[in-house]
Image (cartoon, grey):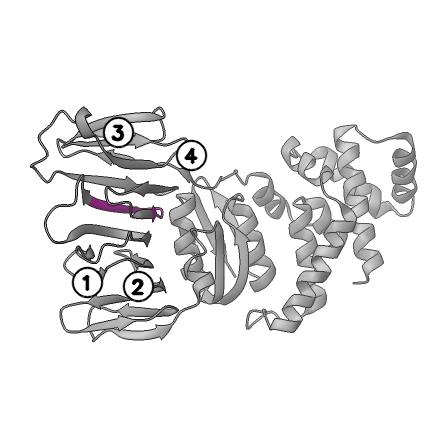
Amino acid sequence: MSDKKLYDSFHISKLLAGKLSDTLTAAEEAELEAWLDRNAGNREILERLLSENIRDGDIGLLLEFNVENALRNIKARIAHDRDHDLRSERTKSYPLRIAVAATVLIALSVGFWLYKGKPHKEQLSLRVKKIEITPGVNKAILVLSNGTKIDLQAAQRGNITNQAGAVVRKEADGKIAYRDAGSAGTQPDTENELNTLYVPKGGQYQLTLPDGTRVWLNAASSLTYPVAFKGKERQVKLAGEAYFEVAKNPEKPFHVNVGSKQTVEVLGTHFEIKAYDDDADIRTTLLEGSVKVSCKNSHVIIKPGQMAVNNLKEPLTIRNADLDEVMAWKNGLFVFNDERIEDVLKIAARWYDVDVEYRAGAGQKKLRGIVSKYKNITELLDNITITSGIHYKIEGRRVILMN
């Protein structure tokens, strides 16, 4: 497909959307009429559109597209794929990929008709009935030692509670921090009370622990910790995924326990742990400093840029880590580098709080790409469609992928 034909397809699609929304100028109306008169098939496209229940939101989305930018983005994406071999194993035809990319970007059945011919009503229905699944937000539940639960998303900024000589405060940026209550403490500073921060699917959260350690928790994760670190060690318990920037204290090592499966010991450093129950292994990645990772049958010390992998069966192994990929979730991105679609969407499902179903092996293809995690899920799925050639539909909060 030539650049001119692709450009014309975008442009005519926008004119058709303008016709449906009654927003065309006189000049645009004349241009569209000339195109409609060119052949009977063109007018049939408009008649079919007028007879279908196309959502105003879909029309508005198309009207917002910048034709020049869309064409430039598609060409850049295809050139990038050529240079870096970002194709899936079964997607070899670049002309077809350009057509698919354009179809995705215009996000309306009009484009598909212009590129490939008129679709079946079932295909149009999949597009029209797709609901909007928005990205996750900063939200968490704080459970105090007495069992009290506090919805941190709804909590007002300022002091939330005072316990065991420590004040829990919601800061201006929404995170929570533990501070020494000083004379304001109303409880004796003798008991080592535990709090737990739960981050549900569709959420993320940041907190500052009593020692100044900063922790970022990913979706479907929890951290249990004392309101004051006493004794000779600082102990916390993690389920799920978190990034730690540990406050330095050589006299009091910092330990992260992943149930009974693994312990990470540090003095002061930056590292990430991914330890979801439904993952095949536990991965500890070091960004700065030094950490000791221990499990039942072995222990290793890793250096910055390395990852310790614990598959729960064999001794720990050390790999070189892709730090961009490891830290993507904290940096607001999905980054996948030769990852199976199934693995990519396992991560996305936690963030968007959806279930994913695969049909006919659709989850096994491998992908490369970068997508903002603050976009609606359709943008991620559309990028997967461009790269792999698979199809998807959304039913409620269930995403179904098909070859």
Amino acid type of the residue tagged 4 in the rendering: Asp
Q: Position of residue 267 (x, y in %)?
A: 24, 59
Q: Secondary structure at mark 2?
A: strand
Name the side, left or right, on which 123 lies relative to 317. right
- Mark found first going from the N terminus, 1 or 4: 4
In front: 268, or 361? 268
In front of the other: label 1 or label 4?
Answer: 4
- Find the distance from the CA under tag 2 to the CA under tag 3: 30 Å
Residue 362 appearing in the image: no
Q: Which residue is mark 4?
A: 173
- Mark found first going from the N terminus, 4 or 3: 3
Q: Which residue is mark 2?
A: 284
Evaluate if marks 2 and 1 touch, with contact meaning CB atoms under 8 Å apart. Answer: yes
- Mark found first going from the N terminus, 3 or 1: 3
- Find the distance from the CA under tag 2 to the CA under tag 1: 10 Å
- Find the distance from the CA under tag 1 to the CA under tag 4: 32 Å
Q: Which residue is mark 1?
A: 262
Amino acid type of the residue tagged 3 in the rendering: Ile
**Residue occupying the point 91% across, 40% down:** 31
Name the side, left or right, on which 30 lies relative to 152. right
